[in-house]
Image (cartoon, rainbow, N blue to C red):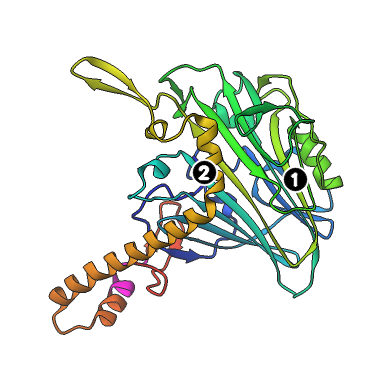
């Protein structure tokens, strides 16, 4: 589960400023087990995660300033100020009712893009890592990991352009700890994305984060020492160097895959059920590869679903408002509702104001 990805329809589209997105804690510790950094002209800005807390004070490492958060039925978008660029981190968890195969894939996209705010080019690097703690909430359980290119397990010297990392743990089928399943595979994927230099590495979190902040690259090496997440915290990282550009973007897919997915009580007793995606793809590797490579098509389908959802909701309430309010125009009704019943405080204690211009 990710921090604020959209997992299904039924969300309003909102945009609100927030002082620090890292204060938003809705899920299992995406913030605590991740480090996401963009470097602009030798200054590194951490925009999601708390990886910088594992490092000594470094003058050229600082938090990005959160600007806005907005979301709809498909996306959760965050924007940050980082020197002379704006960073946008966009989670896409597609809901496509007419495509059960793709909707059943338990992965989300994270696209991070930067855009210059002064119409100049800047020296840009991206860094991201995920901790082995994603695979289990128990910090004393040994975690294993492998690097894949397609369906082939590779080591650092063999890997080329597109990589898939699967964190594995000793499974306890249908068991959980602190609401976290104790079976399945955590997967984290990316590719070169047109960068001048693309590198990866697994190892101790402090070492990799410090190396990137100071050198802006990784060593294409794999840490082969399986261990618990609390022992020299193992992470897997990607780094991209785009050189001097005015805009750039990178994409990841991330998620937790379980086989079987659930137990179901039937007339023949308790039966373990496989996830739906097993009917559509040969194995986990084909599913991950398919998901990563259909991003552009998924964006189009997600946009079409969001547009249809907005139209359906608008049509329903337009008709019912007309009946309920008789002589009151729809615009007056929306204004009345927005000022009388749609402002308030959310579950995190933050005030919100309903804005009909980008809500439904």
Q: Quadrant of the C terminus?
A: bottom left
Q: Secondary structure at mark 1?
A: strand
Precedes in sequence: disc 1 or disc 2:
1
Give the image location of residue 84, x and y in percent.
Answer: 75, 68
**180 lies above or below 76:** above
Q: Is residue 167 magenta?
A: no
The CA span between labels 1 and 2 is 21 Å
**Rendered location of residue 348, percent (x, y):** 45, 52
256 left or right of 103 in image: right
Q: Residue furthest right?
A: 215
- Residue tagged 2: 291
Front residue of 33/198: it is 198
Nearest to the observer: residue 317 or residue 99: 99
16 up-or-down from 199: above or below: below
* Along the viewing direction, whichever of 181 and 287 lies nearer the viewer: 287
Residue bearing the label numbered 1? 239
Q: Residues within 10 Å of mark 1 (few under 14, many from 20)?
A: many
Residue 330 seen by the camera: yes
Considering depth in this image, is 343 or 323 the residue closer to the camera? 323
């Amino acid at each position: 589960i990710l921090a604020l990805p959209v997992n299904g329809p039924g969300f309003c589209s909102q945009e609100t400023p927030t002082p620090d997105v890292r204060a938003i804690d809705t899920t299992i510790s995406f913030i605590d087990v991740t480090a996401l950094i963009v470097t602009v002209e030798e200054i590194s800005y951490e925009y999601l995660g708390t990886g910088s807390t594992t490092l000594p004070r470094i003058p050229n490492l600082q938090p990005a300033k959160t600007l806005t958060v907005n979301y709809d039925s498909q996306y959760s978008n965050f924007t940050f100020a980082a020197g002379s660029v704006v960073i946008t981190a966009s989670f896409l968890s597609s809901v496509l009712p007419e495509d059960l195969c793709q909707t059943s894939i338990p992965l989300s996209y994270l696209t991070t893009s930067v855009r210059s705010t002064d119409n100049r080019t800047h020296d840009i690097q991206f860094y991201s890592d995920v901790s082995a703690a994603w695979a289990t909430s128990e910090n004393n359980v040994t975690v294993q990991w492998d690097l894949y290119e397609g369906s082939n397990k590779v080591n650092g010297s063999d890997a080329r352009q597109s990589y898939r990392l699967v964190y594995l743990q000793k499974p306890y089928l249908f068991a959980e700890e602190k609401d976290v399943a104790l079976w399945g595979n955590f997967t984290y994927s990316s590719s070169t994305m047109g960068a001048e230099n693309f590198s990866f590495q697994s190892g101790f979190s402090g070492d990799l984060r410090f190396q990137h902040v100071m050198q802006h690259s990784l060593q294409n090496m794999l840490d082969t020492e399986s261990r618990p997440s609390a022992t020299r915290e193992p992470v897997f990282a990607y780094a991209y160097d785009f050189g001097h550009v005015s805009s750039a973007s990178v994409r990841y897919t991330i998620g937790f895959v379980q086989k079987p997915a659930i137990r179901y009580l039937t007339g023949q007793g308790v039966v373990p059920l496989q996830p739906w995606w097993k009917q559509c793809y040969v194995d986990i590797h084909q599913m991950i590869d398919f998901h990563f490579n259909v991003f552009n098509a998924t964006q189009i389908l997600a946009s079409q679903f969001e547009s249809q959802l907005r139209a359906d909701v608008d049509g329903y309430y337009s008709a019912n408002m007309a009946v309920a309010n008789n002589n009151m125009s729809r615009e007056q009704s929306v204004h009345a509702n927005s000022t009388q019943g749609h402002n308030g405080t959310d579950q995190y204690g933050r005030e919100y104001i309903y804005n009909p211009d980008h809500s439904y």
